[in-house]
Amino acid sequence: MIALLNAFYKARYQRFNNRSQLQHWQAKQIKKHLGWVCQHSPYYHTLQGQPLDQFPIINKQIMMKHFDQLNTRGLKQQQLFEIAIEAENSRQFKQSNIDDVTVGLSSGTSGQRGLFLANSQERQIWAGNILGKLLPNLLTKHRIALVLRANSPLYSTINKGPIQFCYIDITQPIAVWMKQLDQFQPTLLIGSAQALQLCALFTGQYSALPIKPTRIISGAEVLTPADKAMIQESFKCPIHEVYQCTEGFLGSTDQFGQMRWNEDIVFIEKHWLNEQKTHYSPIITDFRRRTQPIIRYQLDDVIKVSDSLNKLGSLKEPACLKGPVYLKDHEQLINGSKTVSVFEAIGAIAGRCGDCLILNKQGKQVPLLPDLIYRAISLKLTRHCDYRISQVAENKIEIAAELSMQGPIQAALVGLFTQQGLSSVEFTFALKPTWNTANKQRRVVNLCSS
């Protein structure tokens, strides 16, 4: 409990005056962390005393290949997979542990399932950070509903004191889990974009009293602008986002509605995906996790650089991304306080690198980023629409949507391709996609990227 309260206090109240102070503090945390990891992880033992930039960049494939040597508890991958899969198949997630270490599985969207390990202290730190960054206020009781594919002892760590926690298993029929939501009446609703859409569409149909959360938090999947607008209109409450995955609690929405990296937990390097440096895949170093070190781990996600004002117009991101500055005429919005997060803003979590469409431009194959497609379609459509855009061959795109929406979506894509100077493609059409809550919702998919 001490670790939880300490993490909560730091997440809620720790402030940095500027980027330089933050970066100096990060450097000290990283140096200390790397020294400990090199002593306890056989994989990193030979790098003792080396700076971060001398550590190898790894990904899920490399981590899983060297998992037994990389973790600091001498745990074996095969045994861990058996424990986690048994817990998931039986839906008895409290059994997903070995000694004091919780074992979790990623969803496998990228084609390979990954393992997640956290000991009891790391679970407390995670819970403290989650509560510190996400709770709307501290003066009322909170009923938190987590609407996701799988539960974990990690999540139940936050079931403390004035916090009531309820896991909603969306692999069950929708009538079952919507009834559970109705009975629980959450004040804080956390779920994947797909689950939140289902809640918005069916809360009146399956609930005697429609749920009325005071805040909604989306995570685990890309939340497109159109989907966000639909959910927000249905529930009439703010929607925040978290960037939470097996690699850690990476980002969250601040008090102004701006998504930011949790730079008090992770250090971010950028692998740029285009010459304009508008999009990158993040390279993560988590200086809190020891059981399963996350050091220079490159995610497959596409991150868009922030380039706009937040909703209140009170923060502006300079081009150099050295942190937010206040506009003088909005300082009174926060009672004149000049203490504000200097954590770097995230423009959008725009999808996976593997789901970029690869199309022809003047004889060369170039990637088209998923968020450009989301934006083009949302600007063209006049109402919310379920769709999936799939690249099924080198020069062929399939549009899956209801019949009346296929034409407008095709027109949006043709306009985008023309604007980007891409060669014309062949379009095929399919029925509206049927989403499976057991898997992630992906609106842009490259089926021939491998």
Image (spheres, rainbow, N blue to C red):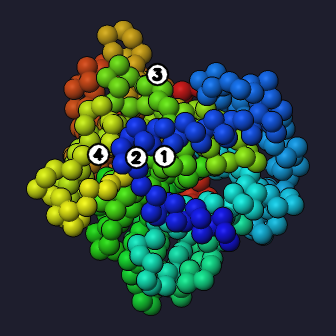
Residue 234's quadrant in the figure?
bottom left
Q: Amino acid at mark 2?
A: Phe
User: Earlier along the polypeptide chain: callout 4 or callout 3?
Assistant: 4
Examine the rendering and report whether any part of residue 21 can be seen.
yes
Asked if the residue under mark 2 is in contact with the one under mark 4, i.e. CB atoms within 8 Å, the reply is no
From what the image shows, is residue 330 above or below residue 222?
below
Give the residue pinned by disc 1.
263
The percent coordinates of residue 171 (x first, y second) are 63, 66
Distance, label 1 to label 2, CA atoms, is: 6 Å
Task: Give me the disc on residue 394.
Answer: 3
Q: Nearer the viewer, residue 274 or 21?
A: 21
The percent coordinates of residue 390 (x first, y second) are 45, 37
Residue count near mark 2 (Cα–Cα under 10 Å), binned few <14, some 14–19, many ≥20:
many
Q: Nearer the viewer, residue 105 or 383?
A: 105
Q: Amino acid at mark 3?
A: Glu
Side of 149 where 322 appears, left or right: left
User: Earlier along the polypeptide chain: callout 1 or callout 2?
Assistant: 1
Locate the N terminus by quadrant: bottom right
Task: Give me the disc on residue 324.
Answer: 4
Q: Secondary structure at mark 2?
A: loop
User: Earlier along the polypeptide chain: callout 2 or callout 3?
Assistant: 2
From what the image shows, is residue 419 above or below residue 156?
above
Give the residue pinned by disc 2.
343
Q: Amino acid at mark 1?
A: Glu
**Most extreme residue toward the bottom, as rendered?**
208
Residue count near mark 4 (Cα–Cα under 10 Å), binned few <14, some 14–19, many ≥20:
many
Distance, label 4 to label 1, CA atoms, is: 14 Å
Asked if the residue under mark 2 is in contact with the one under mark 1, i.e. CB atoms within 8 Å, the reply is yes
User: Earlier along the polypeptide chain: callout 1 or callout 3?
Assistant: 1
Q: Secondary structure at mark 4?
A: loop
Q: Residue at x 25, y 37 (%)?
A: 318
